[in-house]
Image (cartoon, rainbow, N blue to C red):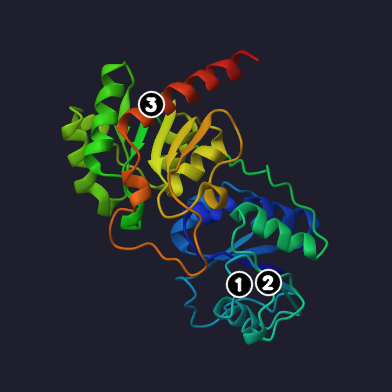
Amino acid sequence: MILALRALGVGDLVTAVPALRGLRAAFYGEPLALAAPAWLTPLIELIGGVGRIVPTDGLTLHRWDIERPRLAVNLHGRGPESHRLLHAAAPESLWAFANAEADHLDGPEWTEEEHEVQRWCRLLRHYGVTCDETDMSLAVPDRSAPRGVTIVHPGAKVPARRWPADRFAAVARQLREAGHQVVITGSVSEQDLRVRVAERAGLPASALPSTGLAELAALVAHARLVISGDTGIAHLATAYGTPSVTLFGPMSPARWGPPDRPYHRSIWHGTRSEPGDRPGPDVHPALLAIGEREVLDAVTEVSAASHLMSKL
C-alpha cells in the first residue's frame, strides 16, 4: 500500500492533485490511501485513483488503523511533525522533504518561495516519479446545479484574506444590474456574511444556495464566473476551467495562484512574503488596496477571454 498525507483544506487538496496522480500512475495496481480530513471525502472521490481515505484531524491521529505501508509520502509539509506522524505508520520507505529534526535527510530541500503545485511535483521527481503539473482537473459531481451563474464567495478561513463585505456587495450589485445571475456562496459559519452581502447587493433569498462540498463543486463546474478571495473555491475554479477573478492579500499568487490562463485573473498589490510570515487578524493591506472597479475590469477581461476560447 502507498500512503500519502495531505491533512489540510480544499485548496490544499486541489493543488496536490498532480502529485497524487503521479503517485497513482507510478504505482498502478497498488492501493493508494490518502490521509486527509473526512469532510473532504466528496472532493477526494472526484480525483480518481484513491482507494482509501484515512480520516485525520490535522496531524492528530490516535493510531494508524491500516496495514504497514510499503511507502509513505508526505504531501503535507516540511516536517518534523508530519514526518513523525508518517514514521508512526512504520512504512518501509518515507518520501519527504529533508528535515534533520525528524531524522530524514534523503529528500530535497524545501523552497519557501515556490508554487504549491510545483512543490509537491518536485518532491516526487526527486524520487523518480513523473508529474504533470497541469493535470489539476476534477470529475464533475453527479449533482443538480444551475448553469451559468456568477458565484461571489466573500468568505475565507483566515480574516486577513477576506475582502470587505461592502465591496463584494457592490461588485455583486453591478454584475446583477449587468445581467449576471449572481449567487453568494459560503460555509455554514459564513451564513451571516452571505446574507449581508446578498442584502446589500439587492439579491433575493434564492441567491443563497445551500451547498455541501459536492454541490459546491458542481455549481463551480457549471458556473459562468467565480469571484473570491484566496480560498478553496478559487482552486475549484482552476480545476474546472471556470473563469475566475481571485483577490490575494497576505499570500502571493506566485505561490497559490491559478495557472497561466487568460480566463483566470489574480489581483494582488502585496509584496514578497518572508519565511515564517503568518496572516494577522485584520484584513491584509494588499486586499484593501483592491478597488471595486479593478475587480469589475478583471471580470470583463476574463469573460472576453473565455468567450474567445469557446470560439476556438
Which mark identifies residue 68? none
Does residue 219 appear to the left or right of 79 in the view shown? left
Residue that label 1 marks? 78
Ranked by sequence position, the earlier of labels 2 and 1 is 1
**Distance from Cα at disc 3 to Cα at disc 1:** 39 Å
Where does residue 271 sit, x and y in percent of width and height?
Answer: 47, 52
Q: Residues within 10 Å of mark 3 (few under 14, many from 20)?
A: some
Which mark identifies residue 149? 3
Position of 207 relative to 17 (above/below): above
Does residue 293 appear to the left or right of 87 in the view shown? left
Does residue 183 appear to the left or right of 71 in the view shown? left
**Distance from Cα at disc 3 to Cα at disc 2:** 41 Å
Where does residue 91 sit, x and y in percent of width and height?
Answer: 71, 79
Residue type, label 3:
Val
Residue type, label 1:
Arg
From this viewpoint, is residue 312 visible?
yes
Q: Quadrant of the C terminus?
A: top right
Q: Residue at x 26, y 37 (%)?
A: 167
Does residue 175 appear to the left or right of 238 in the view shown? left
Q: Quadrant of residue 81?
A: bottom right
Which mark identifies residue 97? 2
